[in-house]
Image (cartoon, rainbow, N blue to C red):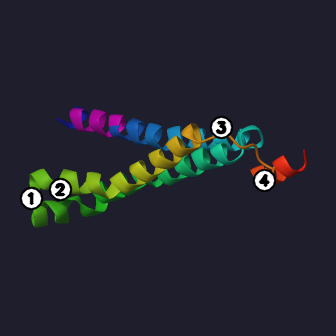
Amino acid sequence: MHDDQMAAGIVGLLLTTVEILAPLAGAVVAALAIRRRGRNARLAMVGCLVMLPAPIVSTLGLTLALEPLMQSVGTFMAGHVLTAMTLPFHLVGLGLVLAGALSEPRPAGRPQAPAAAVVESH
């Protein structure tokens, strides 16, 4: 039984590490692309940083709040409540990453002239 608990703990630690490193790596890659991609890369970077606290909140919730949650909402609902605590981080972060990926590219540092000003100059 002790070996199973140790293995489960190691797997949980590895998964949490991946959950932290993946958005962190995404934020670094997006930060490096800001010069080329401008606002799009900035949105992606912020989205990755917004996702970063989710596994930390989840781990703290499991460590500090699981027992009280199981007593107040029941054993089966406690896991869902912990998932609901991290869901806003994932949804907002994913929304920002998608906004950066799908919006019209505008390079940083290049203000665009209004269409009327371009027409008048011709």
- How far is disc 4 from disc 2 in space, using C-alphas? 58 Å
Q: Which three-letter amino acid code belongs to the residue tagged 4?
A: Ala
Q: Quadrant of residue 105?
A: top right
Residues at badges 1 and 4 in contact (C-beta under 8 Å)?
A: no
Between marks 3 and 2, how big is the CA–CA gap? 36 Å
**Whole-Å distance between the Cαs marked 4 and 3?**
36 Å
Q: Mark 2: which amino acid?
A: Ala
**What percent of the width, then of the height, locates residue 95?**
46, 47
Q: Which residue is mark 4?
A: 116
Q: Mark 1 = which residue?
A: 74
**Residue 87 x/y as whole percent:** 34, 52
Q: Who comes first in sequence, dot 4 or dot 3?
A: 3
Residue type marked 1: Gly
Other-residue count near label 3 (Cα within 10 Å), few / some / many at <14 / 14–19 / ≥20? some
At label 2, counting other C-alpha atoms closer than 10 Å, the crowd grade (few under 14, some 14-19, many 20 or more) is many
Q: Quadrant of the C terminus?
A: top right
Q: Which residues are magenta?
A: 4-11
